[in-house]
Amino acid sequence: MEESTKLVDESTEALWYVVHTYSGYENKVANDLQTMVENRHLQELICDIKVPVEMVPEIDKNGKQKMVEHKLFPGYVLVKMVMNDDTWYVVRNTRGCTGFVGSDGKPVPLTEQEILDLGVERREISVGFELGDTVKVIDGPLEGFLGTVDEIDPEGNSVRLIVSMFGRETPIDLELDQVEPVKEE
């Protein structure tokens, strides 16, 4: 196939792409696409399909609060895939799919920062400290301060320290990569 007739820039790495769908058809498109991937044995090329959702509290007509699933991006499905003409064709020709998000009809993958911001992929975070450990702040306005770990939230990427400021014990919240364990000598 000549370069000029290629539909997409082919890659060998699976990247996240945003697929536009008819509003309300996100789950149907995701399920149909997953079925097509399994039937055609394309699991190596189309690795993951997600409809980003969040749980939101709502009050029903009886006045009771219940958690309801809301789509974060109505009309969009996220697909992690190796982009080539075949995979493009499979996704693009799934019923309810209207195309990829991108410029000039070319799919544009999400950046690393967009993937992190959307929470599409969870990264394993190894924390080198525990509750009660002394750590040093290595970034931000309190750089150089020492504190005691009071709380660790790996899901929220945060840590609460108790630091001594102006003679008082003060709790501060930082991101996990803003502190490091103090090395015992």
Image (cartoon, grey):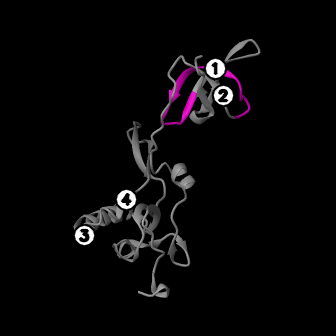
Amino acid tagged 4? Ile
Write down the residue under mark 4.
49
Give the magenta part as a residue range: 140-159
Write down the quadrant of residue 80 in the picture: bottom left
Write down the residue under mark 3.
40
Pointer 1 and pointer 3: residues touching (CB < 8 Å)?
no
Write down the residue under mark 2.
137
Amino acid tagged 1? Gly
Amino acid tagged 2? Val
Looking at the image, tell me whether mark 1 or mark 3 is earlier in sequence order: 3
Which of the two residues, 5 or 162, is positioned nearer the viewer here? 5
Q: Find residue 77 and report its horizontal and vertical position in percent.
A: 42, 62
Side of 148 relative to 93 (left or right): right
Real-space Cα distance between discs 1 and 2?
Answer: 8 Å
Real-space Cα distance between discs 2 and 3?
Answer: 51 Å
Q: Secondary structure at mark 1?
A: strand
Q: Is residue 147 magenta?
A: yes
Real-space Cα distance between discs 1 and 3?
Answer: 55 Å
Label annotation for residue 147: 1
Check the image and report above or below for 15 versus 126: below
Real-space Cα distance between discs 2 and 4?
Answer: 38 Å
Mark 4 vs mark 1, foreground winner is 1
The crowding category of the residue bearing disc 4, from other C-alpha atoms within 10 Å (few below 14, some 14 to 19, many at least 20), is many
Write down the quadrant of residue 168 in the picture: top right
